[in-house]
Amino acid sequence: MIARTTPDERLSPLERGAWRGFLRVHAALTRELDAALEREHGLPLTSYEVLLNLADAPDGTMRMSDLAESVLLSRSGLTRLVDRLERDGFIERRPCPSDARGANAVITRAGRRRFTAARQTHLAGVRSLFLEHLSEREAEQLARLWDRVVPGAAE
């Protein structure tokens, strides 16, 4: 473990390198994946992530609040994104049967087709930009570390 410091102390070079490295790698990879998905499928990474979550959900349906949490967007941010995806015909909003105030997002056939086409681009990008730089052992270590920082993060 990295030695603890007081809250007002600056990060040590090791701490700073770990933190800044994480931020820079995340930013670079998401930027590259977003550009590839936009270029090849006209689909931003955030839209792809919504379609991914819905495609993997039972019956292609998720409550809007659960979807917002799974894609790390605020409810208002998700609402705007869902509005665009709905306008494009990739998802539909339906009333939630168990909560009259809630709404579900449901992937459409067109959404599944777009997702299926974009999935190969996304997976190829994840592999070439990230996974190919790690050994199997290093990938296992990273998954364990992410789960230590945020339990369930690697699931």
Image: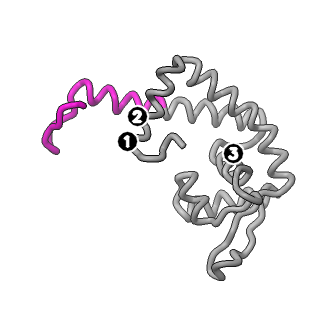
Which of pointers 2 and 3 lies earlier in the amino acid sequence? 3
Asked if disc 1 and disc 2 are in contact, CB closer than 8 Å, the reply is: yes
Q: Position of residue 86 (x, y in %)?
A: 76, 61
Name the kind of residue labelled 3 in the image: Tyr
Q: Nearer the viewer, mark 1 or mark 3?
A: 1
**Along the line of sight, the residue nearer the viewer: 36 or 62:** 62
Q: How many badges with numbers are in the image?
A: 3
**Where is mark 2, residue-wise?**
145
Q: On the image, which quarter does residue 3 sit in?
A: top left
Q: Position of residue 65 (x, y in %)?
A: 57, 65
Bin the neighbour count of mark 2 within 10 Å (Cα to Cα): few under 14, some 14-19, many 20 and up: some
**Along the line of sight, the residue nearer the viewer: 22 or 76:** 22
Residue at position x 74%, y 33% in the image: 39
Q: CA distance from mark 1 to mark 3?
A: 25 Å
Q: CA distance from mark 2 to mark 3?
A: 26 Å
Asked if disc 1 and disc 3 are in contact, CB closer than 8 Å, the reply is: no
Residue at position x 63%, y 24% in the image: 127
**Where is mark 3, residue-wise?**
48
**Along the line of sight, the residue nearer the viewer: 103 or 35:** 103
Residue at position x 28%, y 29% in the image: 16
Name the kind of residue labelled 2 in the image: Leu
Over which residues does the magenta segment extend?
1-25
Q: Viewed as shown, does residue 41 lie left or right of 132?
A: right
Residue at position x 44%, y 30% in the image: 24
| Mark 3 secondary-structure assignment | helix
